[in-house]
Amino acid sequence: MSSYNKVILMGNLTRDPQLTYTSSNMPICKFGLAVNRRFKDAQSGEWKEEPTFVDITIFGSRAEPFARYHTKGKPAFIEGTLRLDTWEDKNGGGKRSKLYVVADTWEFVGAGGGRGEGGAPMGERGAPMGGGSQQEAADAGYSSQDDTPF
């Protein structure tokens, strides 16, 4: 049987990205993303929002630019895959597991002013092109408006 593992998320960072390096000097960026599900309550007819908190990890060359341009509360668009890590609890608590997203690419979203914020043109693998100023975005035909329908 075939399988398919693809995740697409857009939300706001719940904490500042943490950038670390492996012993071989590979960058690793970890952060949390809050993604809201908006729905109409069947009983009251009111609109409600339900947040989901997702841990994200970026490995390699895309990690450093992400950490440089993003902070807690800023929006981000992430594409990646699900990964499940399992391990034995050190205190004899049995098996533990954690499901998280490994980001393959990322993009800026939302309106912003200044270097590296909303609408910046993106290079391959989530790296901002040419510093990502608003003028460079406009010159490249990108809008600073968030055209995402949700």
Image (cartoon, rainbow, N blue to C red):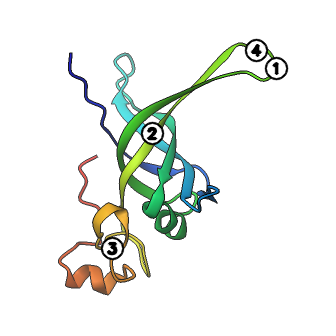
Q: Which residue is drawn at the image coordinates 29% and 72% (left, top)? A: 144
Instruction: Name which residue lies at 17% across and 77% down.
Output: 141
Q: Which mark is residue 91?
A: 1
Q: Could you tell me how far apart the alpha carbons at marks 3 and 2 are, in whole angstroms?
A: 24 Å
- Residue 42 lies, in percent from the top left, at 34, 18
Where is residue 104 drawn, in percent x and y? 36, 50
The span from disc 4 to disc 1 (Cα, nearest Å) is 6 Å
From the image, state whether disc 3 or disc 2 is nearer to you.
Answer: 2
- Lower sequence index among marks 3 and 1: 1
Q: Which residue is mark 3?
A: 120
**Which is more foreground, mark 2 or mark 1?**
1
- What's the distance in space between the residues labelled 3 and 1, CA to CA? 47 Å
**Marked residue nearer the N-terminal end (3 or 2):** 2
Residue under label 2, please give it: 101
SS category of the residue bearing label 1: loop
Left or right, 20 with respect to 11, comes to right
| Residue in front for this viewpoint, 144 or 81 | 81
